[in-house]
Image (cartoon, coloured by chain):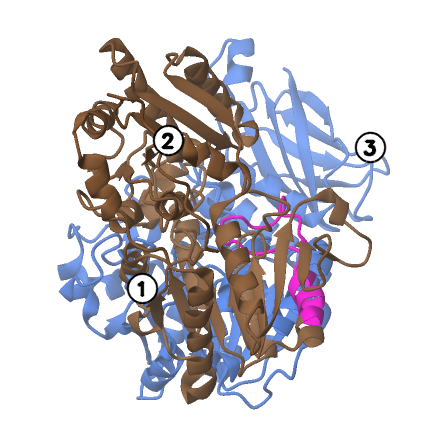
Amino acid sequence: MIGTVETVVAVDEEGIFLNGWASDVRSQDRIRLTDPTGGSTEVELGQRFARPDVAAMAGTDELHGFTALAPLPPGPLQRSNLRLEIEGPAGPKLTLEIPDPIVDPTQGRRHVLSLLELIKVSDRFMVGHVYPAVERLNRRIAEGLGVKEIADHGPVPSSADVSIVVPIFGRLDLVTPQIALFARDPEINAAELVLVLDSPELEDELLELTHHLHELYRLPMRVVVLRRNSGFGNSSNFGVEHSSSPLVLLLNSDVFPDEPGWLSKLTGVYRTGEVAAVGPKLLFEDGSLQHAGMYFERDPVSRQWQNLHFHKGMPSVLPAANVERRVPALTAACLLVGRDDFTAIDGFDPAYVHGDYEDSDLCLRLHESGRECRYVPSVELYHPERQSFAESISKPGGSGHMIYNRWLFTHRWGQRIESLMEEYSSELPLTQPAASQ
Amino acid sequence: MRVLYFVHGHPALIRGGAEQASLELFEAIRDRDDVDPHLVARTSEQAFARPGTPFGLVDGTEDQIVIYTRWEEDDRVLQTAGAKELYTRHLAGLLRDLEPEIVHFQHSIHIGFEAIRLVRTMLPDVPIVYTLHEYLPICHASGQMVRTFGKELCTHASPQRCHECFPDIAPARFFIRERFIKAQLELVDRFVAPSRFLLERFAEWGLPREKLVEIDNGRHPVEPIPPRELRPGEMRSRFGFFGLLNPFKGIEELLEAMKLLDEDDRDDITLYVSGANLDVQPMPVRKRLSKLLDKSPDSVHFLGRYDKLTLPRRMAQVDWVVVPSIWWENSPLVIHEAFMHRRPVLTSDIGGMAEKVDDEVNGLHFPVGEPEQIARAMLRAADTEGLWDGLRAGIPEIMSSEEAAGQHKQVYDELLTSDSQTPDVTTTMSG
């Protein structure tokens, strides 16, 4: 029997996440993690998966790849000389050296999620191995998060109606045009504008730019610099935390207003009543619809729920896209919420990695209050393309973090969405029979 | 009245029609006793790269300032300086020192549209005038409005069309470009359009009509060169091309036309090419043009660059001037120069050229970009008895720079006396 443990992620003091391959591992085998002092823990393997390279070498087509979130014998986070011992009913079969782990939690999380691009996810595997590993890594990552610096340019209005929170993800080239268009609008000048920089390495460059932009445009703004890359949800949460107005407008850095006056139209709708959040119509640069509310549809292969935008790519004059109404969810590219509501539910859930599905998750949690998410087509802004945070859907099944987010979203909200989407079934492109899964 | 002009180049440092027109206006304004102007001309000349200041003076002047800007890393798509201390430190200091009562941008390329924003922010009550010399706010392709593939004329910009011209730049970027540039231009109080054609094009693009005023470039008056003396039986068969040697000026089409005429044994029809800037063209263009010039028939005489002194001599050699540009043009200086020396003009039937030359009145139009048609027009010009005299008689007076200065002064006065020169920030332009 042959095999190796290829990569190990230090999850925390109590566990490691490992992956490797081995020939001839049977379900009745007993697998243990041991250390030189004699400590040992039982390991339950996670999902097995195909390793064509190993299969070619071994000449068998069994699933050689293995993964596991393994509990550690008591001891410090970093340690050496751990071994993975595999023992069959007839006695010891194989002992594998455990290599030095990836200690950095962000790198570790990236590695764990990358495995999802190779392995078809099952609930058992996700619930038993990936989700707890990622959650525990998230906790370690969160310890390193925080605000590094806050810089105000000009007197940022402290008693404004609305705080506008714009996370900036490395695309400093979008800042100048967005500020130039904001400056045209007296309502934005009166708002509390907060830019949140997710990339601390760009701190000097951004602060120099915003200093000059403030001199040029006289638009007051606050820049919140984060200690490290934090993702969309965390960045927005920090921005909200460091603002104070009763209403919060979450806005992407690549959303551009058309004409002044849009902000008060949105707040006007918000104040009309039983509304938890409002979002405008968003247009691509050619005037077609980018966003007219979101709905959910099962991915035909994975059966996971995914976000889709109503009427995306259609002409903006489409009658169906011009009805102000309740929708299942709104994009956080431009979303107005009440500060109290947002903070009462702790804002975006940082369990989602990088920036996907947390807006749907937020909307569904806001729904639970009994108030609706309202789509407001009379307000139009442009969202030319999704360029404000990195997108890496180059792989057929999506990148690891997207697969993870989609699973997490489905796991949490599947049943709720099922009934919610029945209300909208008549307007979906193809009405599918309710899934029985 | 203190007027501050921004120009994208100074003729003492670089050749160009808009640069020349801007300087002549400045000089004519300066001759008035009611205006105290300063000129700020952009340069990329390394000699002006001085520590601590981008400013210097044009040799022998004390009212013509040069500003050195580097544009390599700056955002060319948005036409604004990446290093923003150009505005907040240097130009802000200049505005404080010179305290202009009118700021007139003759151009903003290589200074950047945010210079307009700076003026508005620092001097909220000072009227801003902007002269449109070509279509740069609309078109990223050097403002020519000619597609970058083939030589198709472009009628309007859109994110998708601009992306077709520049496949490496996303449509979204062009969307942002238009919005950004319009956000700066809406701070301008008056746009000067040297041609009706250009005025209409900018109105279609979304500049408010009430802010657009048509004033042609004025020219310093010259003594017209007498007509070329003909030998007995000789026809008016000598043509001149004056201009920059770049593909947009139509020199390739004109040389093709000369080849066709030569093949028809019409080597009595001759062309005198006075051209500059071939050396600064991109290598493929230079190669192509040099080859064409080398291979052109003996009836083509290449005379090299010209200037204020050599122009009259060059004009004296020809009967007609050909302006075969394949882009829209605005108010081409060479048409003014031909008319001032009373030479009828053969020109492309589009844009500013068709507007400034009246077909069959003071020149002839030919379909743009078609060598056969250029050749046919030249044949007709050379062979038709009396045509030259008739067209010559139809040549209009060219407005003097003194008169143009007067018209500009009138615009400045209007802006200073009206209460509405500061645009409401909610005044918007249609998209």
Residue B350 visible from this viewpoint: no
Callout 1 environment at 10 Å: few (<14), some (14 to 19), or many (20+)?
Answer: some
Q: Look at mark 3 in the image and give the residue it sits on.
A: A81
Q: Amino acid at mark 2?
A: Val
Residue B233, located in which quarter of the rendered image? top left
Distance between mark 2 and mark 1 Cα atoms: 42 Å
Residue B93 inside the magenta-drawn segment: yes
Q: Which residue is mark 1?
A: B206
Please determine whether, in this image, residue A77 is positioned above or below residue A177.
above
Task: Give the magenta-colored segment's residue range.
Answer: B68-94
In space, the residues marked 3 and 2 are separated at their CA atoms by 94 Å
Residue at 71% x, 41% y is: A41
**In which chain is the residue bearing label 2?**
B
Q: Residues within 10 Å of mark 3 (few under 14, many from 20)?
A: few
Chain bearing tag 3 is: A
**Is residue A426 at all visible to an observer of this figure?**
yes
From the image, state the color of chain A: blue
> Residue A128, position in %: x, y?
53, 47
- Residue B69 on image: x %, y %: 66, 52
The residue at the point 63 percent across, 61 percent down is B40
Q: Which chain is brown?
A: B
